[in-house]
Image (spheres, coloured by chain):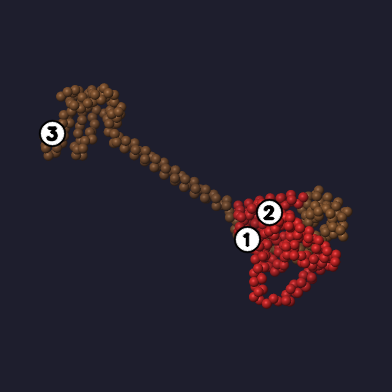
């Protein structure tokens, strides 16, 4: 028997026997088989091979196989608690960051006046940071001209030339008197009222 | 064409795998039901008459244990056949080593052949079976996957680790050899 020259048709015969061809393709094969003895013979062989394979194949116990399989990873059940832990951890990080920022800002705000004592001298009387004993603060009474005409809210660089000159004149009027009790060596600073000169 | 049917099957398999990964054990049952019998058929047609169940079970266990490595560029069935093929090769190697240690029992093969003759009672089926058994191992693998499973040459090439063109040649040579055997017998 001569072999069919239609290679494409012969290539489709296994799918035809297997039943996986589309309806149109299967119809074309049917029409071809009517006039091709070689392909009809091949179809008989193919069906026989399938029948032999089916006869020789033992039935498989599906439930036994399934029982031997590993458990599914169950991702849905695992992901949910993981995402919760993730959120809590981030809340903890966020709270810690806010705490550090708050403490840091407060500390810097409180430390600022110590670094520059002139910046808080908005009152008429200040405690001068002189290198004396801790229990002997020195009272400094600012002159009226200073109280009325000068603001000590800023640094020296904030003062005008006129203000600086007035400040120097007032500093000249400051008199430091020795203490009556030499043992204590407590200095007393007096500032004359409006005194431009001694 | 058969390609659309194969695509539909592949889509169903991918959906089942996704369900199983999400924790649905019933999806595993459906996967086994879809593919166990073809795998058993392939194993049985390649001489693994003993322990077909075990081979198929091992194939599924290995597949599910490494399902993360499954790439959708091949169908699940092709991937399963590839695993089964490797298991069968491992078993053949082990049997070969055992055969080197134990003296070959000559009567065993004769008994198997007689039992098979009884099983395949139909004369035509018996002749076809004899013709298929005369094929080379590679021809037989390609022919079986093409005929009994309806696999495309591209998928067969993955299983037997060859090329699509070579598989097409193997198939047609096998068919020619079987037809010649049947006409001469």
Are circles 1 and 3 on residues that touch, CB within 8 Å? no
Are circles 2 and 1 on residues that touch, CB within 8 Å? no
Which is nearer the eye, A145 or B91?
Answer: B91
Q: Chain of mark 2?
A: B
Callout 1: SS = helix
Q: Label 2: how many residues lie within 10 Å, few (<14), some (14-19) or many (20+)? A: some
Q: Chain of mark 3?
A: A
Assign the N terminus of chain A to one quadrant of the image.
bottom right
Let me know if residue A159 appears in the view. yes
Q: Which residue is mark 1?
A: B62
Chain B tint as drawn:
red
Q: Label 1: how many residues lie within 10 Å, few (<14), some (14-19) or many (20+)? A: some
How far is disc 2 from disc 1 in space, using C-alphas?
Answer: 16 Å
Which is nearer the eye, B108 or A191?
Answer: B108
Q: Which residue is mark 2?
A: B75
Q: Position of residue B168 (x, y in %)?
A: 75, 56
Q: Which residue is mark 3?
A: A178
Labels 2 and 1 in the same subunit: yes
Q: Residue at x 34, y 39 (%)?
A: A107
Callout 3: SS = loop
Assign the C terminus of chain A to one quadrant of the image.
top left
Q: Chain of mark 1?
A: B
Q: Position of residue B38 (x, y in %)?
A: 72, 60
Callout 2: SS = loop
Q: Is residue A125 left or right of residue B38?
A: left
Labels 2 and 3 in the same subunit: no
Chain A tint as drawn:
brown
Q: Is residue A182 left or right of residue B92?
A: left
How far is disc 1 from disc 3 in space, using C-alphas?
Answer: 100 Å
């Amino acid at each position: 028997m001569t072999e069919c020259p239609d290679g494409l048709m012969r290539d489709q015969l296994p799918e035809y026997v297997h039943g996986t061809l589309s309806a149109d393709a299967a119809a074309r094969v049917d029409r071809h088989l009517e006039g091709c003895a070689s392909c009809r013979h091949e179809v008989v062989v193919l069906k026989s091979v399938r029948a032999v394979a089916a006869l020789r194949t033992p039935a498989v116990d599906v439930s036994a196989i399934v029982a031997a399989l590993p458990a599914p990873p169950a991702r849905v059940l695992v992901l949910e608690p993981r995402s919760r832990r993730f959120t809590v951890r981030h809340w903890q990080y966020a709270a810690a960051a806010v705490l550090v920022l708050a403490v840091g800002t407060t500390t810097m705000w409180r430390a600022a006046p110590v670094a520059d004592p002139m910046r808080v001298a908005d009152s008429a009387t200040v405690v001068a940071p002189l290198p004396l004993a801790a229990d002997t603060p020195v009272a400094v009474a600012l002159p009226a001209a200073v109280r009325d005409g000068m603001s000590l809210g800023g640094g020296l660089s904030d003062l005008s030339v006129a203000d600086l000159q007035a400040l120097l004149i007032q500093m000249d009027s400051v008199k430091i008197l020795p203490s009556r009790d030499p043992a204590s060596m407590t200095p007393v600073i007096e500032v004359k009222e409006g005194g431009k000169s001694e | 064409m058969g390609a659309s049917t194969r695509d539909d099957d592949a889509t169903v398999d991918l959906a089942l795998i996704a369900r199983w990964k999400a924790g649905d054990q019933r999806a595993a049952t459906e996967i086994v039901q879809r593919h166990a019998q073809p795998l058993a058929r392939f194993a049985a047609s390649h001489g693994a008459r003993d322990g077909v169940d075990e081979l198929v079970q091992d194939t599924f266990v290995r597949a599910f244990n490494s399902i993360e490595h499954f790439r959708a560029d091949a169908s699940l069935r092709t991937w399963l056949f590839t695993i089964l093929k490797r298991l069968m090769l491992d078993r053949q190697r082990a049997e070969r080593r055992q055969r080197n240690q134990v003296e070959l029992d000559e009567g065993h093969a004769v008994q198997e052949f007689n039992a098979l003759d009884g099983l395949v009672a139909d004369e035509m089926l018996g002749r076809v079976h004899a013709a298929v058994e005369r094929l080379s191992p590679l021809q037989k693998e390609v022919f079986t996957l093409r005929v009994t499973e309806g696999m495309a040459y591209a998928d067969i090439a993955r299983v037997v680790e060859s090329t699509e063109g070579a598989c097409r040649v193997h198939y047609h040579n096998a068919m020619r050899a079987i037809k010649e055997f049947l006409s001469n017998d």
